[in-house]
Amino acid sequence: MRQVTKSRYLAATLTALAVLAAVAAFSTNVFMQSTSDPATLQPTGFVNDYAGVFDPASKAALEKKLTDLKNSTNPQVELAVAVVRTTGGRDIFDFSRDLARTWKIGSKADDNPSALLFVAIDDRKYFTQISRDLEDELPDGLVGSLQRQYLVPEFKKGNYSKGISDTIDAYIARIRDKGNVAGVPAASPAVGTADDSMPAEGYQILCCVGIVIIGFILLGLYFARDSGRGGRGGGGGVVDSALPWVVGGIINAALNSGSSGGSDWGGSGSDGGWGGFGGGGDFGGGGAGGDW
C-alpha cells in the first residue's frame, strides 16, 4: 500500500513538473522576442506588437492604414511599427536600425522610401528609423517634433497604441503634403475578417492554459484518491490512463510554442494574408528618438 501511494505521489509530481515546464517554455517563447537581437524578431505585418499594447481592432485599423499608404503612393512608401518590451540592454538606435535592415523594409526599387517606428516599453524609449529616400519628407528634426507632439503625451498616460497611431497619422499626412498621392488604394481586407481573428499567440495561450488546468485537475484527483474518499475504484483508472496523454500533450505544446513564432513570415500572400516587406532596408541612420 505504501508503494502504491509513493507511485501516485511520484506521478502527481511528474505531472506538476511537466505543467510548470510547459508554462516556462511558453513564457520564454513569448517574451524571448522582446529581449533577443533583431535577427530573432519575425514580422507578421506592418504592425508588429511583441509587447501586447494593441487591441485587435486598433491593430487591424493601423495595419489597413499602412497597407493603403503603400498601395496609394508612387514610389511606394512602407511604414512599419515594432513594439517590444526591452532591447535587452542594447542601444535603441542600433537595435532599431539593425531591425529595419534585417526586415528589409521598403521596395527593391532605387527609390524606396520607408520607415520603422520602434518602441521599447519597459525601457521607456522610442526611435523612428527613416530610410535615405524618405528623409526629404521626414527630416530628423520634424520626426523628433512629431514624436514629442503626438507620441510622448499619450505614452505618459499609458495610451501606447494611440500614441503610435497618432504619430503614424502625422507621418502619413506629411508624406501626402509633400506630393506623394499617386494611385488609388488597392482593395484590402475589411476590418472584421482575418485581422479581427485571434492571433496565433492567443491560441497558444489558450492551449497552454487549458493544459495547465487539466494537469492540476489530475493532480487534485491523485490527492483526493489518496485521502481515501474515492476508494480503490474512485476514478484512479481514469487518472492513470489519462496521465500519459496529458504529460505528452504538455511536452508537445511546450515544444510547439517554441517553434511557431515565425510561422507567418515571408509567405506569398496566396491566402490573402501579408506577404512580407518589399526587400529594401536602405537605412543610413536618419531619424529621431527619445524617452518619456
Image (spheres, rainbow, N blue to C red):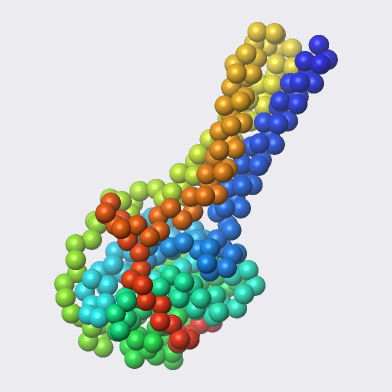
- Coordinates of residue 247 in the picture (x, y in percent): 61, 31
Q: Position of residue 62 (x, y in %)?
A: 34, 65
At x 39%, y 48%, the residue is 198
- Residue 236 horizontal side relative to residue 119, left or right: right
Q: How many numbered circles does the render carry? A: 0
Residue 81 picture quarter? bottom left
Q: Extreme left residue here?
A: 184
From the viewer's side, name the closer residue of 121 and 80: 80
Q: Looking at the rendering, in which quadrant would you find the N terminus?
A: top right
Query: Residue 219, percent across and down?
Result: 67, 27
| Above or below for 23 versus 39 | above
Q: Nearer the viewer, residue 228 or 285?
A: 285
* Residue 167 visible, this orientation: no
Identify whether 165 is placed above or below 258.
Answer: below
Q: Residue at x 60, y 78 (%)?
A: 91
Toward the right, the furthest residue is: 2
Residue at 58%, 47% in the rendered image: 26
Asked if residue 81 lies left or right of residue 190, the reply is right
Please state, as top left, top right, bottom left or bottom right, where the C terminus lies in the image. bottom right
Q: Residue 72, how many percent across, how many down? A: 21, 74
